[in-house]
Image: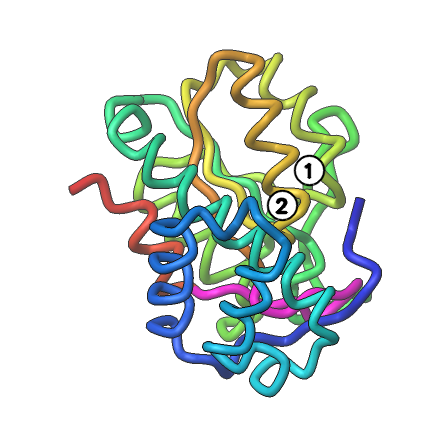
Amino acid sequence: MPYKFSFDLSRISKAFFRELASVAAEKGLHRKLGGQARHLADRFRIHEITGLEVSDALMLVEDLVDIYVRNISERQRFCKTSRRALFLPHCSRKYMDKRCQARFNAEIPSYSCGHCSEDCLVNQATKLGEKKGYDVFVLAGGSCIPKILKKRGYEGAIGVACSDELKMAGDYLERLGLTGQAVPLTKNGCANTKFSLNTLRKVMSLS
């Protein structure tokens, strides 16, 4: 279920998240939302930086750290896969109206990027994924993923989405015996959502 609050972390240094996640994972704070987690929030001035209420910020941090830890634990296995899919959120398209030339295929179900805007995140990510040999799907929602995975026989997948949706997708992949990597959104919402292309590029690197 999507968060009931909005966030925009796109202006915050990625180093901030790496350090935060490392400290939280080391101390196990991502699974302890009590006083220790509040100490972590105070230490990193999360409320001041994100503008979120402490309870919302802690929920977001917990999910981000869980994703970070799962990416690390699945990394070696993911690098050994050969048939991979990349799932992108349609809400990161530059345009959400007829100016977007993406075509929707109800049988898959997924959008196919029309490459109409060079500065569109989905366009850039699609090109990056295709160059790396991924089958790219631009999804209207996470409910499309099971149908695609069952039809196509992928060994691994990269998902770009809200942290809470990525956690559910990770659990689903685990039940299927598949492996994956995740790239969380830095700005959520129903449109104009954002994610880091550099993070996606690093996740795609198999070195």
Residue 64 appears left or right of 71: right
Tell me the quarter of the image containing the C terminus.
Answer: top left
What predominant SS class does the magenta segment belong to?
Answer: loop
Question: Start and end of the magenta stretch?
Answer: 186-196
Question: Disc 2 or 1, which lies upstream in sequence?
Answer: 1
Whole-percent x and y of residue 127? Answer: 41, 53
State the SS at label 2: strand
Residue 69 in picture, x, y percent from top left: 40, 43
- The residue at which mark 2 appears reads as 138
Left or right of 86, for residue 82: left
What label sits on residue 110 in the rendered view? 1
Q: Are marks 2 and 1 in contact (CB under 8 Å)?
A: yes
Give the residue at x 68% y 59%: 101
In the displayed image of the protein, which residue is found farthest to the front?
35
Position of 26 compared to 66: left or right?
Answer: left
Looking at the image, residue 142 lies above or below residue 103: above
Q: Is residue 192 magenta?
A: yes
Q: Please identify the quarter of the rendering in which residue 54 is found.
A: bottom right
Q: Nearer the viewer, residue 84 or 35?
A: 35
Q: Nearer the viewer, residue 4 or 28?
A: 28
Q: How is the image coloured?
A: rainbow
Hey, what amino acid is under mark 1?
A: Ser
Amino acid on which the number 2 mark rests in the picture: Val
Above/below status of 198 relative to 207: below
200 versus 41 height, above or below: above
Residue 204 lies in magenta, yes or no?
Answer: no
